Image (cartoon, rainbow, N blue to C red):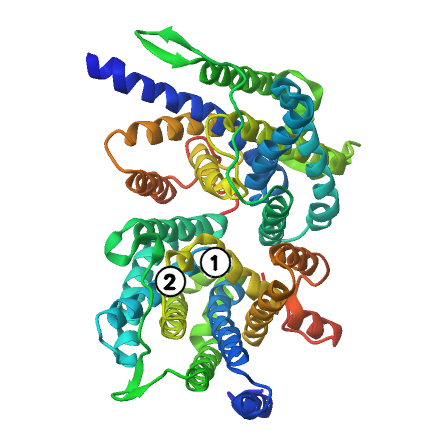
Amino acid sequence: MEYLVAILLPQLLHGVVFGAALGLLALGLTVIFGLLGVMNFAHGELFMFGAYAGIVVIGLTQSFWVALVVAPLLVAAVGAVTEVATLRPLYRREPLYGLIMTFGLALAFREGARQLFGGDMRRILPPIEGSTPLLGMMYPNYRLFLLAFSSLLLLAIWLFFTRTRAGIIVRAAVEDAEMLDGLGVNVPRVFTLTFAGSAALAALAGLLLAPVFTVYPQMGVEMILLAFIVVILGGMGSMGGSVIAAFVIGIAQSLLTLWMNPQRVAIAIFGIMIVVLIVRPRGFFGREGVLE
Amino acid sequence: MNRTISWRTVVVFAALAALPLTPWMSKYYMLLAFDALLFGAVAMSLDLLIGYTGMVSFGHAAFFGLGAYSAAVLLERGVLSLWLCLGLAVVVVGAYALTVSAFATNRRGIYFALLTLVFAEVVYTFFRYTQTFGGSDGIQGLPAPQLLPGMALDTPVRIYYLVLAYLLLAYLACRVLVRSHFGRVLVAIRENEARARFIGYNVQRYKMGVCLISAILSGLAGALYAGRAAYATPDLLHWSISGEFIIMVMIGGLGTLVGPIIGGAFFILLQEKVSSYVEWYSIVVGVVLVLIVLFAPRGLLGFRRAWRGRPGGEAA
């Protein structure tokens, strides 16, 4: 019981918190995948941009809360410009080209950030301090905020996709972009706005996690593989699947660290993914035969 | 044109062989030329998978890096024979490639790419954190391998000729391969896998075969690289290196063999030259890549072939 409260419970909660932020990151990735058929390698860099944009805005306004609104908008603008300039010409080409393209973009973005902000580790201080007694332990307030905020955001996204016309149009574009075009919807604009939205989500995840982790130009590279794993586990293009898989991976990673050193955890996570890809390549909720 | 060796191949290799004789080839340029040819050979081996069979391997760095570590482990322990280093690389990389491809060739498209990627990441993580192999520092300060007892490959000119010989043999092997019956079946699999299966070919066996060949060619290159660089580090296994290999193939042109060699050499020279002028060379490399995808999607060679109205530049 001691063990449960002192070690297992906080670790479990850490996992849930991390899973929620990972869900935001993976959600953008999976929507873009469903829409454009592109595995966006630059998604991790948009995540990193979110954290740096946050540092800049906090430096100017001294407020984390302003940054939480402004930074995702800035990154969304970067995403929209990127989509129009580089991905739009690739719509009718092999998905492979999108992969190479975003790999090149990721290289340029990462180095750009290193040139602008330097390569050293930075921190953002948590805007909420202190801890709250919870189930017999003390838990940092900021992480509770992170969990609540991410969960609300995920709920809002779900409502957006099920209850609003714009959300339904995006889902229709995932289903059959050509038919949607025939029905008179400006599909390229849908693609651009969705990409911008996905960039904003990545930026939000980056900024929200910044007070928990550290900020440096390579931070996206570390996260993107995990996000890929989540997207595949959940089933490519399945939004609900991605969110569930994010929590599964977040909790698994967090709990496994109790019994293993970090590299064994990494290998174990890769192992889970290999087994899923072999046994059930479409993931938890993916449709069969997508891009096989 | 059924000849394996065209006069153009002879001329190009003769020119490359004469390169060390030219007066402006300093030690620095010899080593740069080594890297250019070596990574050209790796890109060519990857082209067998991507260009000819339509399988995008995102884990080629593991084959290359395992080859490098195989040679490094022997050299570190005083086993200096080049042939033993290459032999161990073939065994290790071959065993790993068979394991990976047994699972990965069941899956197609992006799932194949991701399976190879994840397997490679397991290898990366293993070497990155295993102190027996030097952890994140890798194995450093290796002695030069010996071609024959007493004949060390310790000058830039010697190792340059070594890599040139390797490139020539690998190129001829690949060329024979893609023109053989085996190579035709690979193209058939790329064009229509189901149909190839219905005709009666054991598609998976062909896929595993070409994976094995491609992996061993890359592994041999890795072993040569460890001999030249005198180190093997986990960075060689990182997935961003696998990405760079794909880029080299794309730059050169899919399914052309020669194209990826040029692409690999071009990429190495670009990276090296730009990085000697500006610190932010990754931006330049990234932008060049974006431009190539946008404006020359068939690669440098494919671009030229399309322009001259000849077939053969296109592949999926």
Which mark sits nearer the N-terminus, 2 or 1?
2
Image mark 2: chain = B
The residue drawn where x is 64% and y is 23% is A67
Residue, disc 2: B65
Q: Is residue B272 above or below residue A58?
A: below
Q: Quadrant of the N terminus of chain A?
A: top left
| Residue B73: percent from left, percent from top | 26, 66
**Amino acid tagged 2:** Gly
| Residue A64: percent from left, percent from top | 61, 20
Residue A273's mark? none
Q: Secondary structure at mark 2?
A: helix
| Residue B33: percent from left, percent from top | 53, 78
Q: Is residue B199 above or below residue B286?
A: below
A38 left or right of B136 in image: right
Residue, disc 1: B241
Disc 1 crowd, CA 10 A, few/some/many (<14, 14-19, 20+): some
Marks 2, 1 in one chain: yes
**Amino acid tagged 1:** Ile
Closer to the camera in the image, B101 or B265: B265
- Does residue B106 appear in this view? no
B37 left or right of B273 in image: left
The residue drawn where x is 61% and y is 41% is A117
- Does residue B241 appear in this view? yes
Q: Secondary structure at mark 1?
A: helix
In which quarter of the view is residue A182 placed?
top right
Q: Is residue A236 above or below residue B135?
A: above
- Asked whether the residues under the numbered discs 2 and 1 touch, taking CB atoms below 8 Å apart as contact, a structural biologist would say yes
Q: How far apart are the alpha carbons under marks 2 and 1?
A: 10 Å
Closer to the camera in the image, B239 or A278: B239
Image mark 1: chain = B
Q: How many marks?
A: 2
| Residue A123: percent from left, percent from top | 52, 30
